Image (tube, helix red, strand yellow):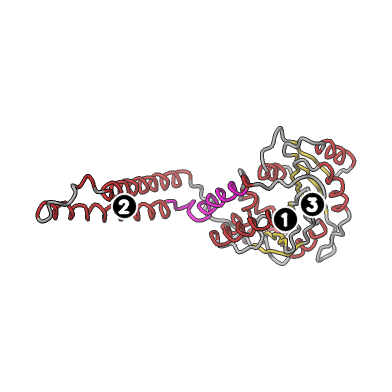
Amino acid sequence: MPNISILIPVLNEAESLEILLQQIQSIHWATPDDKPVSVEVIFIDDGSRDQSWDVMRHLACNHSRVHAIRFRKNFGKAAAMQAGIERSQGDLIVTIDADLQDDPAEIPQLLKKLNEGYDLVSGWKTNRQDPLSKRLPSWVFNRLVSQLTGVQLHDHNCGLKIYRREVFDEIRLYAELHRFVPVLAASRGFRIAELPVNHRARKFGQSKYGSKRLIKGLLDLLTVSFLTGYVQRPQHLLGTLGLVAGGLGSAGMAWMACYWLMRICWYPDWPPLHQRPLLLYSLGSLLLGVQLLTSGFLAELIVAKNQNDSSSYSIRETTKELANRNNP
């Protein structure tokens, strides 16, 4: 029996929760072999200040497969998702926003795509029902993520996704990393797919999007780019930057030495060495290069000291597991 956990982070969405649950319960779940599907719904109240928790508690009391988690304050969507993941029972995990803009009727299509051999399927809001002030920054952000990480998705930030639990056995969410799960999963070798999904206009509440969120997203993109590209080899990044800075500084200092010699021998009217800005720039660049190289060596020592045998790779399955499945 496939088990599916549907995680719904909530922040001031009291009006939409009961409607969303009704739409989820109306879904016709079908599997390739027509096996029954066990579905649980987990609401996570991320510090709502309206009646969201009262609605969630009411729904949980009246539906045995509905559960609710309440935070003491707003910790962010990534923390809400992580709390839901840790308390879920499903082999498959679905995330969906609580504002009714994501259509729960699309979940079976995501499940069907997942069963084609993928580990994560992300929704793609092809006909996004949002104002241009949200769509344009989102388009720019998605292009940046795809270019910098190599994970080519049209909509990294779509809230509607389905995952195999194995993805979250190796990835822990914090800060604002929930929007980068496909990137983090791809870096571990999980198979990623994208599927167009229906997107609806907002009916209740207010958008949580703002300029602060965009800035945080760009900073987190730099973090994810480093984590996925250099977490096991920080010296490749820091050392490269250090060699470039040190090389420029050394070249500048070499020219300053030649300048000093030519001034002494042939051009006494040239300004003295300490009045040349290039001297300060070269010295600063040289010192920066040394610091970056030193930081890279220290980072390599930290990685080597904390390296676990299983953290540098991801195992999909073993022959022993296959044998156990075939001979229960």
Q: In this view, which residue lies farthest toward the top? A: 72
The disc at residue 246 is 2
Q: Which residue is mark 1?
A: 131
Relative image position of residue 90 (x, y in whole percent): 75, 50
Q: Amino acid at mark 3?
A: Arg
The disc at residue 296 is none
User: Label 1: how many residues lie within 10 Å, few (<14), some (14-19) or many (20+)?
Assistant: few
Does 207 appear in magenta?
Answer: no
Relative image position of residue 271 (x, y in whole percent): 19, 49
Quadrant of the rendered structure where residue 55 is? top right
Q: How many marks?
A: 3
Magenta stretch, main secondary structure, is: helix
Q: Which residue is mark 3?
A: 202
Give the secondary structure at mark 1.
Answer: loop
Q: Earlier in the sequence, mark 3 or mark 1?
A: 1
Quarter of the figure that contains the N terminus: bottom right
Q: Earlier in the sequence, mark 2 or mark 1?
A: 1
User: Label 3: how many residues lie within 10 Å, few (<14), some (14-19) or many (20+)?
Assistant: some
Quarter of the figure that contains the C terminus: bottom right
Say left or right for 49 vs 224: right
Does 223 appear in magenta?
Answer: yes
Relative image position of residue 16 (x, y in whole percent): 83, 46
Q: Amino acid at mark 2?
A: Gly
> Which of 137/67 is in front?
137
